[in-house]
Amino acid sequence: MTYCVGMMLERGLVCMSDTRTNSGVDNISTFRKMNRWEVPGERIITVMTAGNLATTQAVISQLEERNKAPSDRHNSLLEAETMFQVATIVGNLLHETIASRVEDTGQRAAAGTFSATIIVAGQIAGMEPRLFMIYPEGNFIEASFDTPFFQIGETKYGRPILLRGYEPDMSFEAAVKLLTVSFDSTLKANLSVGLPLDLLVIERDRFTPLHARRIEAGDPYLQSVSDGWGEALRQALEALPDYRMDGDEGGLSA
């Protein structure tokens, strides 16, 4: 399983992903799920993947191959004129990759076996930062300030925190803190999501990462947030009114 989040802010974009893949409890590995390409001063693009590992690695490998010599290849992310075109390229490639694997296996496997979902984020000079979520069929949706973040993979444990804490004008530092809490809650609830985590902060009109790092097990900031969030939850629970069972229907005491 996987957990990846792309978040749109007024200041730019923040992305975070885990790195765990597993095929059962005795076959757990670490693979990068966040990849990025940049042309300083001109564009920065990041792609996060969730789903069948062979499918997602095939998509990333083909994107890498096209980007190595874009003048000799078509549909390079480094030549696309808009982020919409970038999302279209990735969506078409994802759809074609899944379809080819289903065709190769015939009736032995359903399309869902090779399914994958992708988040594309970035900015091209002269345009706004943009964020897309691409489905296995190759179609996609774009984030807006009504839907300001996308999650893929194991989304349910971290989503309530994002919904309650997100503000479009929040600082990058506050956004990273919010994502860290979301990931910490997911890590504790589902063993198929695991460290290390990859973090990328893209500032509007910068075209190189404002901040990028890998968060390993034992990271002091992650541990501090995890401990602080747990303690804050306990204190919040204790501050809520106690339930009374001394009446006929229970509830708050008079």
Image: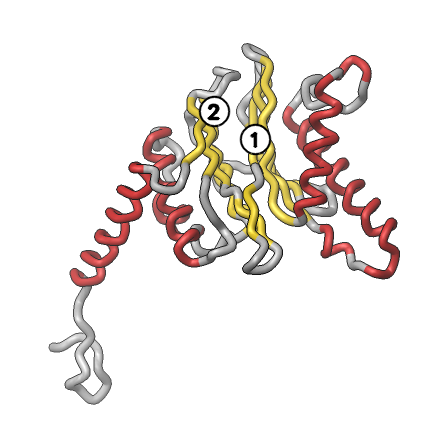
What percent of the width, then of the height, locates residue 252?
18, 75
Q: In which image quadrant can residue 237 be found?
A: bottom left
Which residue does the image show at 76% across and 42% down from the upper left?
A: 95
Q: Residue at x 72, y 18 (%)?
A: 68
Q: Earlier in the sequence, mark 1 or mark 2?
A: 1
Is residue 59 rendered to the left or right of residue 100? left
**Residue found at the far bottom of this picture:** 248
Q: Is residue 253 above or below residue 195?
A: below
Q: Is residue 190 visible?
A: yes
Residue 120: % across, % down: 60, 34
Q: Position of residue 224 (x, y in %)?
A: 26, 42
Report the disc number at residue 163: none
Tell whether label 2 touches label 1 (CB within 8 Å): yes
The circle on residue 121 is 1
In the image, 128: left or right of 75?
Answer: left
Amino acid residing under circle 2: Ile
Res 202 label: 2
Q: Residue at x 33, y 34 (%)?
A: 174
Q: Where is residue 67? Give x, y as percent.
A: 71, 21
Q: Amino acid at mark 1?
A: Ala
Q: Within 10 angstroms of label 1, few (less than 14), some, or many (20 or more) residues? A: many
**Is 179 rendered above or below residue 213?**
below
244 lies above or below 51: below
SS class, disc 1: strand
Q: Quadrant of the C terminus?
A: bottom left
Q: Relative to residue 213, is residue 116 drawn left or right?
A: right
Residue closest to the eye, 239 or 186 = 186
Judged from this view, the residue extending furthest toward the front is 26
Q: Nearer the viewer, residue 21 or 103?
A: 21
Q: Residue at x 17, y 67 (%)?
A: 241
